[in-house]
């Protein structure tokens, strides 16, 4: 037995209510055709804006007046939001919800000019991505610090042979500077011995 149009619509509505994402379908005039329970729950919309026929502009205006779309003129913010959702065949955007959660929206234009919007709460994913960025940034800092340490150690190791050669050169120079004084001392001793011998003082000196 074939289902009537009413039965098909009811079955479709029941099916999309089980989806974990919020889903809403708008006609070519951007008026609501159907939305699921998750859509209404995440956006926390009043009942009159969840009924079929509600204008997308009225929904966006309600959200902007509540502060969901940031500071500024509510009407202008509502128009900008609609333009963002409809300017391309497929769009993906993120914004904060009224409870502070991060919502990711995906919108697709239909062949008849209508619009499908689906979105989900991605707060946990965004938090994990930010934590990963923080860890990566910290890891990069540690790698750079370790690289600097290794560069410094390598430079010190390369410099040690030069330092050793410099010390050896100084020691050689010092030894050479001492040699003339030692020869002069020997000569003086020999002269003293000859002088003492001539004076008959060898016995007294030795």
Image: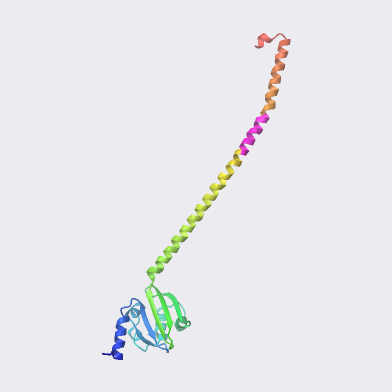
Q: Nearer the viewer, residue 102 or 72?
A: 102
At 66% from the left edge and 8% from the top edge, which residue is drawn?
203
At 71% from the left edge and 12% from the top edge, which residue is drawn?
196
205 vs 27, left or right, is right
At 38% from the left edge and 87% from the top edge, which residue is drawn?
32
Say if 194 sits above or below 20 in the image. Answer: above
> Residue 157's x, y, as percent?
56, 44
**What scheme was used to colour the molecule?**
rainbow
Residue 49, can we see it?
no
Q: What secondary structure prevails in the magenta region?
A: helix
Q: Which of 112 and 176 is in front in this view?
A: 112
> Residue 169's x, y, as percent?
64, 36
At 39% from the left edge and 79% from the top edge, which residue is drawn?
118
Read off the magenta span: 165-177
Say if 154 sits above or below 76 in the image. Answer: above
> Residue 52's x, y, as percent?
35, 88
Location of residue 176 (image quadrant) = top right
Q: In which quarter of the image is the N terminus?
A: bottom left
């Amino acid at each position: 037995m074939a289902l009537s149009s009413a039965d098909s619509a009811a079955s479709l509505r029941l099916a999309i209510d089980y989806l974990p994402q919020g889903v809403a379908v708008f006609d070519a005039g951007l008026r609501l055709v159907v939305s699921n329970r998750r859509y209404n729950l995440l956006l926390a919309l009043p009942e009159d804006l969840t009924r079929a026929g509600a204008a997308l502009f009225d929904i966006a205006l309600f959200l902007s007046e509540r502060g969901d779309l940031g500071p500024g003129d509510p009407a202008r913010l509502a128009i900008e939001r609609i333009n963002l959702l409809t300017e391309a065949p497929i769009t993906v955007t993120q914004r904060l919800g009224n409870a502070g959660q991060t919502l990711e929206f995906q919108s697709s234009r239909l062949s008849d000019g209508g619009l499908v919007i689906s979105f989900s709460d991605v707060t946990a994913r965004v938090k994990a991505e930010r934590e990963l960025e923080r860890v990566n940034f910290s890891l990069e800092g540690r790698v750079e610090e370790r690289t600097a340490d290794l560069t410094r150690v390598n430079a010190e190791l390369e410099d040690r042979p030069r330092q050793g050669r410099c010390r050896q050169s100084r020691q050689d120079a010092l030894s050479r500077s001492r040699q003339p004084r030692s020869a002069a001392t020997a000569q003086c001793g020999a002269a003293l011995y000859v002088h003492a011998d001539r004076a008959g003082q060898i016995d007294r000196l030795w």
